[in-house]
Amino acid sequence: VRLYLENRYRFRVRVEVLDETPAQLQWRDAAFWADVPSGQTAVVRYAIRPTKRGEYAFGAVRALVASPLGLLRRRYTEAHEARVVRVYPAFAQLRQYELLAISNRLTDTGVKRIRRLGQSMEFEQLRPYTVGDDPRTINWRATARRLAAGPDQLIVNHYQDERAQQVLCLIDKSRVMRMPFAGLSLLDYAINATLVLSNIALLKHDKAGLITFAEKISAVVAPERRPDQLRRLLEVLYHQKTRYLEADPELLYTTVRARVKQRSLLVLFTNFETLTAMQRQLPYLRRLAQGHLLLVVFFENTELADLLTTAAASTDAVYEQTVAEKFAQEKRQIVLELRRYGIHALLTPPASLTVNVINRYLEFKSRGMI
């Protein structure tokens, strides 16, 4: 941040500057001093490090100007509309996965190499056979023509993944996503995973889209593959906040039905603490799964998991572990219940969310399920 102080007096002045920094920083004493010679301009510089995404508003700048001996003092206030600075989610993880995807090294970060089943791919070109190619891809007609014209060489059909498939992330912003883990809320984890997954999908020539919702629909970004699609998603996601009300699954279903006409991969980021909470939404999840490939993503409570791995040293600790095991078992039961109705479910620790979601996306593509 830079503040420019111009001295129009005929003498040197001592300036104390007070800047109204954004409320998120909790910095109430942002005071700086500078000596400014007559007719010159001094620059006050200071650095801030936002730790959360969103809009950061800077308020008025106040300056207390004093003469060299302190006999004269005058206060100035630069009153203006709040200057808003946008803070976007961290790009480090996004660029990391992007570079690895381009170089086909996603396995370096834990993304699994998925074995292809069947031929759910599009024909791209003919090319010479190389060791390791599936013998079923040999084009015998093209091989016969090649043998008649020259040296022995098998020709195979080369396929690529089906393109222009739609990947739509549905982010629950209700109160169930407020729970913090390692300094980030579940909503933060969902937003970071959405950006990485959308970027990978765009690199795979698929279309990426977004719906955020709670008791009402907050934002809809139609699934497209435009050069600026990732930027559009960023502009929507950087200022999203959790709500204090419950999500409306019926409203989500009607929105998807009205806005998404093509079969798509729907990745729903939400959280269920109890089987009863999931069963209230189950009728609408089943409807979503009828026309689309639905993946329901919810979160392990890693603090409870850590408690279960710690040796109990007292009766109270045994009781706490019993309660923790009950909650963990209920989470696993939710996965089984969703699968019983043909709905794909992913129960994941928050820290492993991004890798696990990418693995599922690549698995669905390799199996031709989208």
Image (cartoon, helix red, strand yellow):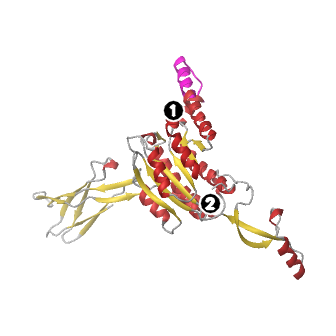
Would you name the residue on which mark 1 appears?
276
Q: Main secondary structure of the magenta part?
A: helix
Q: Amino acid at mark 2?
A: Leu
Using the image, tell me which numbered label, if any, was put on residue 369. none
Residue lying at 62% horizontally and 37% vertically, measured from the top left: 336
On the image, the x and y values in percent for residue 247 come to: 43, 43
Residue 49 seen by the camera? no
Q: Nearer the viewer, residue 315 or 282?
A: 282
Is residue 272 part of the magenta span, yes or no?
no
- Range of the magenta residues? 309-325
Q: Quadrant of the C terminus?
A: bottom right
Would you name the residue on which mark 2 appears?
100
Is residue 324 part of the magenta span, yes or no?
yes
Q: Nearer the viewer, residue 56 or 145?
A: 145
Q: Is residue 95 above or below residue 188?
A: below
Q: Amino acid at mark 1?
A: Thr
On the image, the x and y values in percent for residue 59 come to: 25, 56
Binning the other alpha carbons within 10 Å of mark 1 as few (below 14), some (14 to 19) or many (20 upward) gives: few
Binning the other alpha carbons within 10 Å of mark 2 as few (below 14), some (14 to 19) or many (20 upward) gives: some
On the rendered structure, is 67 left or right of 231?
left
Circle 2 sits in a helix, a strand or a loop, which is it?
helix
Task: For marks 2 and 1, give the one nearer the viewer.
Answer: 1
Q: CA distance from mark 2 to mark 1?
A: 40 Å
Circle 1 sits in a helix, a strand or a loop, which is it?
helix
On the image, the x and y values in percent for residue 45 come to: 32, 61
Residue lying at 26% horizontally and 58% vertically, measured from the top left: 82
Residue lying at 68% horizontally and 57% vertically, measured from the top left: 368
Q: Which mark sits nearer the N-terminus, 2 or 1?
A: 2
